[in-house]
Amino acid sequence: MPGSLPEAIDGGARSHGPDVSACDREPIHRPGSIQPHGLVLVADACTFKIMAGAGDIEKLLAPHWLGANLDELLGQPVSAQLAAKPNASTVVLARIVGTETPFDAIAHRVSNTIVVELEPAPLAMPSPIDVLVEMEEAAATFEQAFGLRELCERAARTFRQLTGFDRVMLYRFLDDDAGVVLAEDRDPALGSFLNQHFPASDIPKQARALYVRNRVRIIPDIAYEPALLRPAGSTPLDMSDLALRSVSPIHLQYLANMGVAASASVSIVRDGALWGLVACHHPTPKFLPLHVRMACRALAGSLARQIRAKEDAELYRERIRLRTAEDAVVLRLGSDISLAGFFATAGDDMCRMLGADSFAAVRGTELFVAGRSPRHDDIRAVAAHVIDLGRALPFSTDRLSEQLPAATGFQDLASGVLAVTMSTDEPTILIWFRAEQIEVMNWAGNPHKDLGVDPHIPLTPRASFESWSEAVRGRSVPWTLFEIEAAGRLKRTMFDARQNRRLFEVNRELTATIADNESLLLQKDYLIKEVHHRVQNSLQLVSAFLGLQARAVGDDVLTAHLAEAQRRLSAVAMVHRRLHSDEHVQAVDLARYIGDLCTEIKSTMDKSWGGQIELELAPILISTDRAVSVGLILTELVINANKYAYAGASGPITIALEQHRNRFRLIVADRGRGKASSGTGFGSRMLTSMVARLSGTIEEADNDPGLRVTIGAPIADDLPHA
C-alpha cells in the first residue's frame, strides 16, 4: 500500500525474479537510526544514566549529555513519573524546553532501558474543549453514515480536515492480505487511487504486525538523512514503539516514485485484528505534532467501533434473509412428498435461497437440475469430486477450476460451487453453482511486472503507479459463512425428512429388522461404554500410581514432577470423558464442548474455584479431532494459570472463544502475577506442539495485571477458498 506505513514495500505477484519474501525478513524494528526531526535518549532502567542517543542532541538539548542523569538533563522527575505507572509501557512526559524549541516527550520501557523520544512541539496548543468538541462532532458524523462505504468516505474527509494532508485514503485488508482503497479525499490536482488494489506483498508481515502495536506513524520528509544511534557500537535498540524510528530505504524510494514528500498512517484495529489503514500523502514536507497524532488515534478507535457496528448489522440482515429463504424451502418438505418430488419442484427456490445460478441434486443414477447449469456429465464429475469433501462440513470454493482442472471447460457456468453430502446407503449430493464473474481489478501499477532475474541485484520499488487493469477469470462471487452454514442446516433438515419418509414407507415391513438393529445398537453402545470404562479405569490406575509414588518418594523435586504428570493425566481423562459424552462424531459445537469441559475441570478443583471461571463463548462448528486438541490446550492453560498465576490458589480466569472470518481465537486471561516461566518446560513444549498441530499461533500479552494468552487457528484443517 503506497504510503500506508514506512515499512510498505512493493512486491507484487511477479512470476520471476528474486525472492520478494526477503522483505518479510527485513529487521525494520531495529534500523539503528531515527528520523532527524526529533531526538532519542536511551538510559539504563535502574540508574537512569544515559547510555546512547540519536539526533542533534548537542545543539537542541545539551552539549554534554552522554553519561548524564536523565532526570537532571530533562529537568523533570522522569523516574518518579515512570514509578507512578509501573505497568505502562509508554508514559507521556511534561513538555521539555530545548535550546531552540520546546519538545513533546514520551518515555518507553524497552527491555532493560528507558527510551525517551523528543519531538518539536507547537508554541500554541488548541483548547482541550475545542479538541473534544471536534472529536465528538466527528464521532457523530460516523454514527450517521449508512453502510460501510459511506462511513469510510466520511472518515476520509474527517481525517483530511484533521491532518491537513492533500490526500487521505481508507484502505481495507482483504482475506488474502491484499488490500483495496474504499474511500479517498484529495486535492483535485492529485491522481486518484480509489478502488485500486494492492498485493499482499506490498506490506511485509512484520510491518503489518507493527500496525497493531504502533497505531500512528509519520514521515515528515522522505528526503531526510538518518540520524544514527550514538555512540557507534551501541547495543541494537528495538524501536517498535518509537514514532521517530527510521524508515526502510526501499519505502522511501517507493514514496519518491509516487511524488509523495510526506506521509502518515493510522491503523484501524477491529477486535484486536488489523482491519485497515488511514493512509495520508502530501506533496511537500509536512509534520504532524503529537497532539494531532493522539487525536487521530482516538478517532481511529471510534471509526473501528462504527465499522464493527456496520459489519455486524450487515451480517445480521444477511442471516435473517437466509433464515427466511430457508424456511420457505423447508415448508415444501413434508411427510407426504418424496425427495425426488421435492427436487423436481423446489429447484428454483433452492437457487434463490443461496443466490446461486443453478442447483443440482445427484443420487445414484438420478439427477435433478434447476437453473442454467453445466452439462449432466460435467455435473457428475463435480459430484464425484465433492462427495467426500462435503460429508462432515459443507464444501465451498469460488474458483473450482483451480481444484478441478476439468472444470475450466465450463467455468462460465460453474466457477463457484457449494456442496453438501447426505451420507446414507445411497449418498445424495446437493450442489449449488455460481457462474463466472469476470472481475476487472484496478491496480496501482502492474502487479505482475517481472523483476530482474539476477538474485544479487537488490530489490527496488516499482517506479510506475499508472492505473493498470486485468480481468480475473475463473472466479465467482464468494460464498459467505452464513450461506455455508445455511447449506449445512438444509442438509440436516433434508436428511431428517428423507429418513422420516423412508421410515413412513417401510414401517411395517421393517419391524423385525428394527428390533434386530436395536439389539445391535445396544451391543455397540455397550461395547463403546466398555471401552470408555476401561480407558478411564486405566487412566485412573496410572493417576493413582503416580499419587502413591509422589507420597512415597521423599524428594520434593520428583514429587512436584509426579504431581504435574498426575494433573496432566487428569486433564487428558477429562477431555476424553467430555468427547465421549458428546452425541456428534465428526463435528462438534466448540462453545458447548468448552463449556462442558470447564464444568468438568471445576469439579476436579477446589470449591473456591466455583465462581472464578468466566466464559464468553461464540458458537463455532469444528471437527472432532481439532476439538480434542483445543480441549487439551485449554486444560493446559487453566493448569498453568492455577500453578503460576495463583500459586495453586484460586483466582479469576476469563475464557473467551471468538470467530474472525475463517479462524477462531481462544483467549485465556488471568489476573495473577503474570508470566512466571521461561517457556522451556515440558508443559510449554507440549502446548507449542498442540498449537502447531492446529496450524495456529500462540501469543502472550500483559493482562494488566496477569497474563493473557491468545490461541489463533483455522476452524478447519484445510480450508477451501471462500
Image (tube, rainbow, N blue to C red):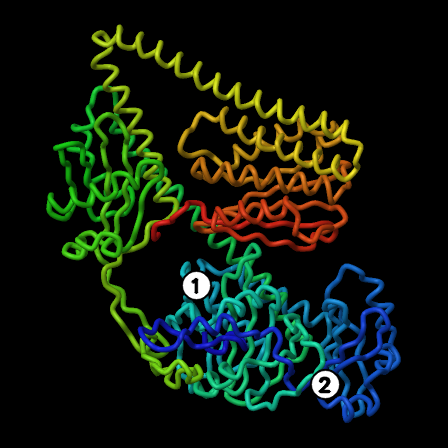
- Which of discs 1 and 2 lies nearer the camera? The answer is 2
| Drawn side of residue 693 relative to residue 15, left or right | right
Going 66% across and 48% down the picture, which residue do you hit?
A: 681
Q: Is residue 239 left or right of residue 473?
A: right
Density class for disc 1 (Cα within 10 Å; few <14, some 14-19, many ≥20) is some
Q: Please tell me which residue lies in front, 504 or 474.
A: 474
Classify mark 1: helix, strand or loop: loop
Among the 4 quarters of the image, the one containing residue 653? top right
Residue at image coords 59%, 40%: 634
Image quarter hosting the N terminus: bottom left
User: For mark 2, what is the residue?
Assistant: 230
Q: Is residue 616 above or below residue 493?
A: below
Instruction: From the top left corner, tell me how far across and down residue 529 is, in percent.
Output: 48, 17
Circle on res. 457:
none
Q: Is residue 458 above or below residue 133?
A: below
584 or 438: nearer the viewer: 584
Q: Residue 289: x, y in percent?
A: 67, 80
- Kind of residue sitting beneath label 1: Asp
Along the line of sight, the residue nearer the viewer: 140 or 701? 701
- Which residue is drawn at the image coordinates 70% and 86% (left, top)? 232
Residue 645, image x, y percentages: 74, 45
> Disc 1 versus disc 2: distance between alpha carbons?
37 Å
The tally of labels here is 2
User: Picture coordinates of residue 644 (x, y %)?
Assistant: 73, 44
Q: Circle 1 is placed at which residue position? A: 177
Which mark sits nearer the N-terminus, 1 or 2? 1
The image quadrant that residue 567 belongs to is top right
Q: Which residue type carries mark 2?
A: Arg
Q: Secondary structure at mark 2?
A: loop
Image: 73 above or below 494: below
